[in-house]
């Protein structure tokens, strides 16, 4: 009897799971169908470079269908809702697709309309985002004609995709204005709801120091209530005002709207409650979730979807074979952080272990939590790795799903992370 | 782990002042916890939010974030900030005797 695995979403997670699962299963006994509402796969890490004119927007887009292995069916349609009891996916076209295993990989969406004033008269005039292709392209034009003033990078609320991207944007903007010789005419700030530059204390201390070195203001614990583009000002819920001439805003994120229409599946933000180790949804054992769509404690990042993919495929295989899922995701994530002027920093961590200094993936490897040119080159080369190794779901020697400890140098918790807390 | 005295009871808290054992909490502790958190006199709305925080915690293992709280408690985010200035999710969690909401990474 042929069984069907339906994968919702043909982005990073959905694509690599489809391809990997295709190799692990027999075509005669398992059908694999990927559903997506469009055929444009965007290399999202590249969006960061678009505003600074170093990446052409169209170079980041390839057809989703072309990234899928032979033997995987691609279906262009919009998901309306999932019926968990009937095990069917209802499409906007009216079609219904039954499944034996469902993989949810529909990611996170930007919801700028949730913040008062954000999509008002100033949207794409003096208020931008670089989290979409259109936004990043429009911002490139605005930065080009920006000759000085106050530039505020604002994160409205967590969670967001790639939590280091706003920091990288600030570092790259600093380098960009220096290159143009107008850095002294620009007041640069990062306005964030977090209590530091980043969520993890050791990395946060290192990154916070880098803000100081570069003269970038860090405004913390700031919960944006309103973006007033006419007055050029952010207003927080507790009444603090931040003036800007140009605002680069990361809007609030939510899961896909179809999750909200599917009884018993999602949380109030439309993310899917998921077992953070087996990656099964809390609602049903035959429903698996990876990447930004899941509510697990890992960052919303491509590396997370990559490492989760290995675990998820093994557990789907086990489920189809009638075995209990035994693979466990450890929360492994890593990311390159561009720091400007051709340098970057790399962090590697999981649920339990914070980013720490050392090397990755082993004692001989890329430097961790330290700026280097090698990391920057690796970040730029990663784009080819993404299309040709990561999406096809291939194994890479030396890079496993679990976080490696070899090469890491445990560091003491920085004193600053403990400051201001009752002990 | 530090401890605090609330309503005559010794309570274990984490370094942020959040209860380690939510079942040690009683409704009688709320006014005193609110005063130390700088929230002042509790009204009906405060109590509704606190009750909701506890229900969410026991149902899901973590208290909600501000946005989720605004979406599901029926109290708009703007109002939540009037009720619990400087961080509704954190303050309400402290007064409700539950750990710091896991929030987002």
Image: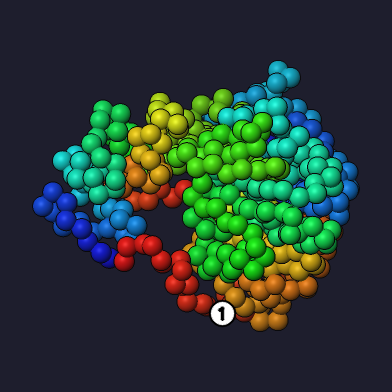
Q: Position of residue A138 (x, y in %)?
A: 81, 39
Secondary structure at badge 1 equals: loop
Dot 1: within a 10 Å radius of its alpha carbon, few (fewer than 14), some, or many (20 or more) residues?
some
* Residue A348, image quadrant: bottom right
The residue lying furthest to the bottom in this view is: A363
Q: Position of residue A241 (x, y in %)?
A: 54, 41
Is A33 displayed left or right of B18 in the figure?
right
Residue in view at x 86 percent, y 51 percent: A53
Q: If the image is split into quadrants, where does the C terminus of chain A sit?
A: bottom left
Residue in view at x 60 percent, y 57 percent: A217
Q: If the image is split into quadrants, where does the N terminus of chain A sit?
A: top right
Q: Position of residue A226 (x, y in %)?
A: 56, 34
Q: Is residue A409 above or below residue A385?
A: below
Location of mark 1 (residue) = A409
Is A56 displayed left or right of B57 in the figure?
right
Q: Is residue A175 above or below residue A4?
A: below
Q: Is residue A83 visible?
A: no
Q: Is residue A208 visible?
A: yes
Q: Is residue A257 above or below residue A292?
A: above
Question: Looking at this view, is A217 or A135 the one in front?
Answer: A217
Residue in view at x 38 percent, y 40 percent: B85
Question: Looking at this view, is B84 or A82 the one in front?
Answer: B84
Query: Label 1 is found on which chain of the structure?
Result: A
Q: Position of residue B19 (x, y in %)?
A: 28, 53
The residue lying furthest to the front in this view is: A185
Question: Looking at this view, is A155 or A229 the one in front?
Answer: A229
Residue in view at x 69 percent, y 48 percent: A151
């Amino acid at each position: 009897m042929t069984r069907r695995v339906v994968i919702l979403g043909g982005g990073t997670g959905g694509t690599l799971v489809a391809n990997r699962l295709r190799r692990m299963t027999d075509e005669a006994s398992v059908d694999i169908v990927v559903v997506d509402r469009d055929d444009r796969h965007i290399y999202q890490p590249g969006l960061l470079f678009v505003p600074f004119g170093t990446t052409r927007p169209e170079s980041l887009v390839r057809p989703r269908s072309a990234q899928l292995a032979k033997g995987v069916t691609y279906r262009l349609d919009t998901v309306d809702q999932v019926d968990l009891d009937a095990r069917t996916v209802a499409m906007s076209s009216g079609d219904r697709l039954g499944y034996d295993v469902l993989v949810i990989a529909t990611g996170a969406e930007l919801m700028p309309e949730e913040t008062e004033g954000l999509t008002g008269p100033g949207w794409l005039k003096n208020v931008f985002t670089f989290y979409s292709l259109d936004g990043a392209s429009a911002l490139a034009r605005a930065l080009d004609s920006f000759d000085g003033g106050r530039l505020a990078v604002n994160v409205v609320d967590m969670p967001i995709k790639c939590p280091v991207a706003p920091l990288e944007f600030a570092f790259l903007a600093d380098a960009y204005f220096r290159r143009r010789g107008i850095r002294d005419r620009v007041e640069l700030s990062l306005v964030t709801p977090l209590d530091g530059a980043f969520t993890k204390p050791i990395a946060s201390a290192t990154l916070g120091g880098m803000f100081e070195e570069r003269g970038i203001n860090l405004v913390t614990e700031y919960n944006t209530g309103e973006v007033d583009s006419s007055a050029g000002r952010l207003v927080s819920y507790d009444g603090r005002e931040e003036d800007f001439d140009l605002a680069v805003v990361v809007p609030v994120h939510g899961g896909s709207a179809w999750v909200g229409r599917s009884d018993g599946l999602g949380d109030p933000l439309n993310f899917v409650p998921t077992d953070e180790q087996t990656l099964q949804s809390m609602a049903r054992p035959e429903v698996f979730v990876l990447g930004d769509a899941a509510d697990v404690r890992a960052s919303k990042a491509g590396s997370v979807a990559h490492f989760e993919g290995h675990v998820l495929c093994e557990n789907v295989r086990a489920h189809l074979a009638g075995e209990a899922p035994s693979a466990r995701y450890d929360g492994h994530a890593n990311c390159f952080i561009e720091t400007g002027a051709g340098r970057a920093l790399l962090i590697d961590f999981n649920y339990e272990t914070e980013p720490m200094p050392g090397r990755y993936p082993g004692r001989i490897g890329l430097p961790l939590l330290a700026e280097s040119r090698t990391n920057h080159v690796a970040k730029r080369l990663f784009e080819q790795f993404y299309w040709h190794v990561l999406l096809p779901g291939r194994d890479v020697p030396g890079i496993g799903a679990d976080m490696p400890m070899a090469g890491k140098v445990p560091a003491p918790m920085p004193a600053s992370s403990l400051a201001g807390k009752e002990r | 782990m530090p401890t605090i005295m609330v309503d005559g009871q010794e309570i274990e808290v984490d370094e942020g002042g959040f209860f380690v054992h939510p079942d040690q909490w009683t409704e009688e502790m709320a006014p005193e916890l609110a005063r130390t958190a700088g929230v002042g006199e509790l009204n009906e709305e405060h109590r509704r939010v606190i009750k909701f925080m506890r229900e969410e915690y026991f149902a899901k293992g973590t208290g909600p974030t501000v946005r989720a709280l605004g979406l599901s408690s029926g109290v708009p985010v703007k109002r939540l900030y009037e009720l619990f200035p400087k961080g509704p999710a954190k303050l309400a969690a402290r007064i409700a005797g539950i750990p710091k909401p896991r929030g987002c990474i």
